[in-house]
Image: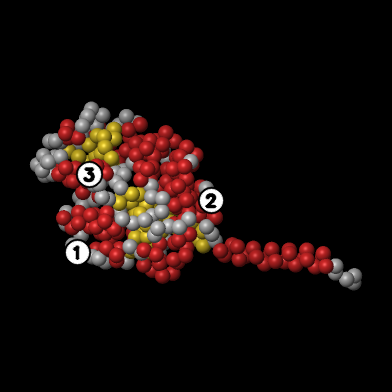
């Protein structure tokens, strides 16, 4: 047998190392699921869609499956069960669910301010025109219900006599009631841009005028998730916040990718971006002042029973997110 040269040894060793390293690379891709309370909300679902489509999760060493849900209660059950590692939903969920004793922690602000919109029948020209009429919301006690009643108060109306706040459920039910003139307006997220383009309604106002101190959407995890997967949570967050920055800096390209998955036209996505794009958080920093305002509001409307210390709601080690 002829002796092995140094070059042959190095070549064979390099090949062996590459083969040996391959399984380690595969194992480094943590397989998890991430989710949002709904799909039809650009600022909520868009960053998760974009992070998946652009390979940002993969670049952070995470094999992430994005799962949109049909509302906050179903998402939170999946997070508590460990089926979803990182969830994003309306901000009041953290206050309501922790008040109910569920072991959740907020890990970032997803959308700052208030991106919810007041959507009206095409013939309605101003908020004052809604006095004596009905405003549609998803459910009694929901975020949309709170905002409708806060809007009435801002206008100096009695929320039980001067307007009628009607719980109707999802967007299809809202639009059907609007078409039948059973309601004159409804409260929704940035998806109001889609129905406006279709000529079914128009966005009259963004509701941060009603709630100057507010957090629209948040990211949260279970306490068990923090104990078991803190590093993976951080990697998922980095991917999502990179996507949020891309949505601002490369809006056209991002809109095209998001449109394919969210089921809207690119024009509708760009219209939604005009509503909520400027509110996308760049680092997830949490305003404790805004969280306190939200807690006081929920207490006032009887949606939570006790005033828990706000620090118990937030896992500060995850925010602000460092990219």
Judge depth for marks 1 and 3 and give the one in front. Answer: 3
**Residue at (37, 37) in percent of width and height:** 274
* Location of residue 153 with respect to 196 vertically, above or below: below
- The residue furthest top is 123
Q: CA distance from mark 2 to mark 3?
A: 38 Å
Q: Say few, some or many: other residues with alpha carbon within 10 Å of mark 2 (under 14 / 14 to 19 / 20 or more).
A: some
For the residues marked 1 and 2, what is the alpha-carbon distance in whole angstroms?
42 Å
Percent x, y for residue 201?
28, 33
Residue 18 occupies which quadrant of the picture?
A: bottom right
Mark 1–mark 3 Cα distance, whole angstroms, equals 24 Å
Tell which tag, 2 or 3, sits nearer the viewer: 3
Taking 269 as reference, is 126 left or right?
A: left
Q: Residue furthest right?
A: 2
Secondary structure type for disc 3: loop
Which residue is tagged 1? 306
Residue 124 percent coordinates (x, y) = 22, 30
Dot 1 or dot 2: first in sequence order is 2
Residue 94 seen anywhere in this rendered image of the structure: yes
User: Residue under circle 3?
Assistant: 210
x, y percent for residue 287: 31, 55
Q: Tell me the quarter of the image containing the N terminus.
A: bottom right
The reply to whether discs 2 and 3 touch (Cβ–Cβ < 8 Å) is no
User: Which quarter of the figure has residue 192?
Assistant: top left
Q: Left or right: where does residue 9 sit relative to residue 271?
A: right
Upstream in sequence: badge 1 or badge 3: 3
Disc with the residue nearer the chain's start (2 vs 3) = 2
Q: Residue at x 44, y 69 (%)?
A: 228
Which residue is labeled 2 in the image?
55
Observer able to see residue 78: no
């Amino acid at each position: 047998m002829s002796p092995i040269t140094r070059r042959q040894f190095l070549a064979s060793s390099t090949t062996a190392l590459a083969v040996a390293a391959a399984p380690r690379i595969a194992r480094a891709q943590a397989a998890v699921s991430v989710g949002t309370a709904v799909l039809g909300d650009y600022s909520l679902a868009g960053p998760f869609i974009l992070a998946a489509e652009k390979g940002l999760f993969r670049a952070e060493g995470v094999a992430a499956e994005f799962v949109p849900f049909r509302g906050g209660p179903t998402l939170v059950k999946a997070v508590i069960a460990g089926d979803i590692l990182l969830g994003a939903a309306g901000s009041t969920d953290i206050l309501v669910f922790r008040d109910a004793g569920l072991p959740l922690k907020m890990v970032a602000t997803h959308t700052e301010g208030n991106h919810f919109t007041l959507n009206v029948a095409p013939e309605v020209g101003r908020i004052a025109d809604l006095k004596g009429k009905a405003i549609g919301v998803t459910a009694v006690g929901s975020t949309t219900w709170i905002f409708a009643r806060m809007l009435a108060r801002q206008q100096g109306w009695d929320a039980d006599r001067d307007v009628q706040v009607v719980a109707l459920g999802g967007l299809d039910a809202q639009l059907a009631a609007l078409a039948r003139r059973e309601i004159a307006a409804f409260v929704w997220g940035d998806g109001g841009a889609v129905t406006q383009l279709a000529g079914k309604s128009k966005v009259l106002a963004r509701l941060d005028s009603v709630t100057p101190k507010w957090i629209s959407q948040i990211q949260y995890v279970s306490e068990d998730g923090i104990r078991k997967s803190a590093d993976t949570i951080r990697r998922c967050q980095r991917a999502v916040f990179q996507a949020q920055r891309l949505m601002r800096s490369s809006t056209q390209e991002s809109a095209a990718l998001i449109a394919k998955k969210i089921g809207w036209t690119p024009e509708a996505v760009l219209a939604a971006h005009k509503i909520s794009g400027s509110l996308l958080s760049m680092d997830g920093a949490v305003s404790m002042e805004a969280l306190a305002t939200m807690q006081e509001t929920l207490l006032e409307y009887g949606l939570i029973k006790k005033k828990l210390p706000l620090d118990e709601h937030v896992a500060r080690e995850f925010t602000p997110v460092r990219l």
